[in-house]
Each structure stands twice: as C-alpha cells, then as structure tokens.
Amino acid sequence: MNPATVDTPPVIRPLPAALQELAICELNEKPDQIVEYILTLRKWIHNQRHLKARTNDQFLLAFLRGSKYSLERAKQKLDRYYTLKAAIPEVFNAERIVDNPQVLEIIREGIILQIPLPENDTRPCVTIIRAASYDTNKYKFADIIRVGSMFGEMMMIDDDRSTVSGFLEIMDMAGVTGSHLFQLQPDLLRKFSVFADEAMPMRQKGTCFINVPSPFEKGFNTLKGFFPEKMKSRISVCSTHEIIYEHAPREYLPVEYGGTNGTMRDIVDRMEAKLMKYREYFEDEHNYAIRKKRSSWARVSKITDSFD
C-alpha cells in the first residue's frame, strides 16, 4: 500500500450496482468525476506543509465519500483525522501493529466481531463488540478500542459499504460486571466518539447496547451524556439481544447469536487473516501525521476544544 505520487492516475475499485446507486443518490457521487476529485485532493495534501497524509486512492476516496464530495469538507476531515489521532495517544500509539501479542490475543478471544455481509447488501456494516468478554486484569478498555480502531481503518479502505452505507456498532454487555463498567473510561469514550464523528470518513449509523442487565440500564443511558450531541440520538440501550436482528438478519450472524453463518471462531480467523495483509500499512503509520509546527498546534488546540 505504497503512497501515490501527485500525478499517479487513480485506480478505483468498482462498486456493486446497488451500492453504486446508493452512492450516487446519497453521496453526490459522479463516477466519471472520481479521478478528478482524487487528483485534486492529492495535490492539496502535497501542498500542505503542516500535514503528512496518506495519498492512496481508496483512502482518499473514503474521505470524499464521507464528505459527500465537498472538497473543503474532505480537507477538513483529513486534517482532523491526523490532529485527533495525535490527541488520543492511549489508542493511537506504537502498539498498533499486527504482530503485537496483545492485539492478536484480543482478536483471538473474539472481543470484536466484524459480521460478514453479502457484497450486494446495502445495509450498514455491523461490528459486534463483546464489551464484557475480556479480563479486566489483563486488558484496559483503551486496549480494546485500539484494536477496534485498527479494524475500523481497514474497513474504511477495504469495505466500500462502510463509506457508502455506513456502519453500526453493537455493544454486547452480556456478563458485564462492576469492573467492566469501571474501565469504560467516559473521558476516553468521549474523545474517541469525537474522533469517530468528526474525523473518520465512514457514516456512523449508531451504537446499540444490548444484553444490558436491568440494574445497569440507567447507568448506560447516563453514558449518552459523554457522546457528541449529534450521536446521542443514535444510541440505544436494550436489555435483550433481539434488536440485533433488525440490523443483521440471522443468516448473516454466527450461531452464537442465533444465526446460521458459521461460528465466532470462523469470523475471528477471517479477521486475523485480513489483519496480516495490513502489516506494512500499520508499520508505516508513524510516517503520517500533523507536523509539529506552531500553526498546526494552534489548530490542534482549536479542534480538541470539543474534548472539554
């Protein structure tokens, strides 16, 4: 996944027909103008002294789609993407590599499950986070988010559905304990939610907490206060898991969730194999950032005001 030069002709992955129609209708996508948009955005990046950003075709296309092809909004999102990454070192740090033993352990324990959907399905991508399935003596909540962020970036580049239809997070709280709640770190939740809302180019359709024990329901509704205003209406809390079938039909889900599409182990194996293909991507990540010049740090301060 080498960076493209300023004038390298873009090569774009074609969309399935149903997804292309959605991109045209909802994102203002004009297939015959995509190349021109990518070249314009790439040249803008090349001229920014404060910003060292990736210039790969699918990466830039994600930001264009996430901005409904407004070049100014795409530029702003790219700037915020790298600015806010620098402001959340608990998540975005040197441990985001594919060979990190902790990263591999979290994947293999099935804490994060990306549900496979058929290519022509235009539903949002679905990620299940089994938020209470990890040992709080072994991992911090930031460790789980770190691995989730890696798969979020891979989805942004690899899965066109995420940038056209969006994505939905389902937080499965089955087995939640007081120690899990204590680790939720509302401040980190707030920071990462701002990053997801203002910097990531994918269309965030919502966060659904399922299997929330009745005694904790009020507490989870209180958590909404830590999310950006726009996201509050997209958060739901449910004491059962039945709502999951509204977003992912049973035939797409593993048997552990009442589905018929293999097991969680099958999903985990596919996710690990996919992660290995991104070895160079994550090893190269330190080369892309907001450069530490005075002007850029004024921008950091302005953008991170939303954390306060």
Image (cartoon, rainbow, N blue to C red):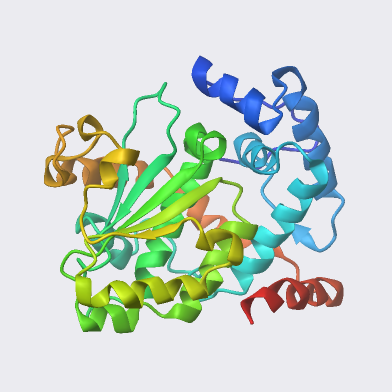
* Front residue (pair 21, 94): 21
Total count of labels: 0
- In the picture, the quarter occupied by the N terminus is top right
Q: Quadrant of residue 7?
A: top right
* Front residue (pair 74, 93): 74
- In the picture, the quarter occupied by the C terminus is bottom right
Query: In the rendered view, does 32 fall on the left or right side of 158?
Result: right
Please provide percent x and percent y for residue 99: 34, 59
> Quick check: can you spot residue 213?
yes
Query: In the rendered view, does 37 fall on the left or right side of 246?
Result: right
Q: Residue at x 62, y 40 (%)?
A: 62
Q: Residue at x 66, y 32 (%)?
A: 27
Please provide percent x and percent y for residue 73: 77, 48
Q: Residue at x 64, y 43 (%)?
A: 66
Query: In the rendered view, does 255 fall on the left or right side of 285?
Result: left
| On screen, residue 10 above or below 291 | above
Please provide percent x and percent y for residue 217: 29, 72
> Quick check: can you spot residue 16?
no
| On screen, residue 189 above or below 250 | below
Please provide percent x and percent y for residue 153: 50, 50
| On screen, residue 245 above or below 12 | below
* Front residue (pair 125, 50): 125
Query: In the rendered view, does 164 fall on the left or right side of 266?
Result: right
Q: Residue at x 69, y 27 (%)?
A: 29
